[in-house]
Amino acid sequence: MPDISNSELLARIDDLNRRYGHMIDDGDFENWPGLFVENGLYKITTRWNYQNNMPAGLMLCDSRAMMEDRISALRTANVYEPHSYRHLIDPPMLTEGTGYTIFVQTSFAVFRTMQSGASELFCSGKYLDKLIDLNDGLKFHERIVVCDSERIDTMIVIPL
Amino acid sequence: MKCFTARKPNPMVPLDWNPNDFSEIPYAVYSDEAVFAQEQKQIFQGATWSFLGLGCEIPKPGDFKTTMVGDIPIIVVRDETGALNAMVNRCAHRGNLVCIEESGTVERLTCVYHNWTYDLQGNLASIAFERGIQGKGGMADDFDHACHGLPRLRVETYCGLVFGTFSVTVEPLSDYLGPEMRANMDRILGRDMEIIGRFRHGLDGNWKLYMENVRDTYHATLLHSFFPTFGMNRLSMKGGIVLSEDGLHHMTYSMRATDQAESQYNAMDLRAVKDGYTLKAPELIEGWPEYDCGTTLAIQSIFPNFSVQQVSNVITVRLNVPKGPQKSELTWWILAPVDDTPEQRTMRLRQSNLIGPGGFIAMEDGAVVGWVKRGIAGAADRKSIIAMGGRDTEQSSNSRCNELSVRGFWKGWHGLMAD
């Protein structure tokens, strides 16, 4: 473990998660890949796929560049009804920490607001994170988003 | 089958409909309750084969999964002999679901309500307290086990795909698919395959809106701008459309690196083509020529609601189950050959970003189903136009700027509905 108490570390991870959530909810997508290390992994999967070791994802980015492509496609290529998210993110639970690598898992819920005005639960699930604590602060080395439901309504274009 | 009673078809729901012209489709077919009910009898319980799942989902004796044929819940189970059986997931006693779980492994199928059990062929095996308790109660004397099994479907498989039908008259699966459709399945799926992902996708619209979209080659480069921007599919690439003889099934294909008319795209001010949009991680679409024929995109639909798709090296099958007249639910299975090299598997997984509910070239399809549903609200007496490439339903075309496959769908649909 890094030389700090768990509660301090958890508070820093909590802060990272909050920044992550607000960044996406405020539409500040371009800064989202910067929360990951360059060779970071971002994957959206579901409980069934995770439990059955299915490697494919609803989104699967194995580099920050690929995350940036997701955002540029969202801005310029893909066609969808404008909508926004609201993340509600639980405090993180430390599962393992060795040196500068930290494993946490965190429950979340995302509400989606469509053009009709309806704000509805879009997804609940948990983040399985591998974090790295380096000089420039905590960054995601891996964030695996495990959705509770196997079913996505209509489409998904904004990262969870 | 002995006790199975075939359902009597109802007369065709009256619609403003010219049975010789499938280029104009009344919007009522996407919302009408009577049309939906008619489809259950004439199409899903009629002379069609419905996709039930993949054999590799239930590899061992006793493995079962549940699915739907139209609005009817179905159990698919592998029995002691290794044979695949499918039956209605509805206890003969009170209609309770026999299998509540989505999948599992059992020795017998047991209804939890009153503990009636069925063997893996669907025969009624035992009834709790059938002879009563201490000589009192017990089942009526005239009750015949043999007439109260779970209603069975005919089951056949092709390339690991399991299909079932309620029809006793529809031709064998192989003939139903026909040689053109089988050839594409052989090419893509005719090897040992495994599932590498499975996702469900809720669609806010009638099941046919999505199945038309699967067959609609006209929209591909217009709605999905990811394709043309990276040269993955332009209508000017070499390719074509093939329909089965009756119009029921379709296959459209194209080959990359055969584009002779690129200037036609660049010259036109299409929204789909964006300047200066390049991938920072081009490995996303990195692939290898997997098929000798050079096909880089193939989309195939098997009537009524199943589809096989190859996008570069990503292989998927899809089933779109109706959930009432104005909702449907799609399942995507992402497949890969078991003997992939690690490098091939990595490329397939990266490319799988193209498909599914969040796919770069697929997410719009889920959305457009809902937009059309909202657009045609209150327009049950009006019609859509499907006249690109003319109004006829010839069997093939070497141009994909053509709505031939969609007209074929309606020809097949109408034939079954009016049967």
Image (cartoon, rainbow, N blue to C red):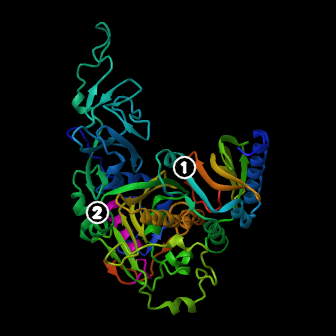
Query: Disc 2 marks which amino acid?
Result: Gly
A74 or B248, which lies in front?
A74
Left or right: residue B67 versus residue B272 is left
Crowding around mark 2 (Cα neighbors within 10 Å: few <14, some 14 to 19, many 20+) is: some
Rendered view: B34 above or below B26: above
Residue A151, labelled with which disc? Answer: none
Residue B75, given in percent of the width and then of the height, sits at 35, 42
Q: Does the magenta stretch include residue B274?
A: no
Left or right: residue B327 versus residue A31 is left
Q: Which residue lies furthest to the left in this view?
A: B2
For label 2, the residue is B190
Q: Is residue B370 in view from this perspective?
A: yes
Write the residue at 57% across / 76% down: B225
Q: Is residue B15 in view from this perspective?
A: no
Residue A142, given in percent of the width and then of the height, sits at 62, 54
At mark 2, the secondary structure is: loop
Q: Magenta segment range?
A: B399-419
Query: Disc 1 marks which amino acid?
Result: Thr
Left or right: residue B300 versus residue B119 is right
For label 1, the residue is A46
Write the residue at 34% across / 54% down: B50
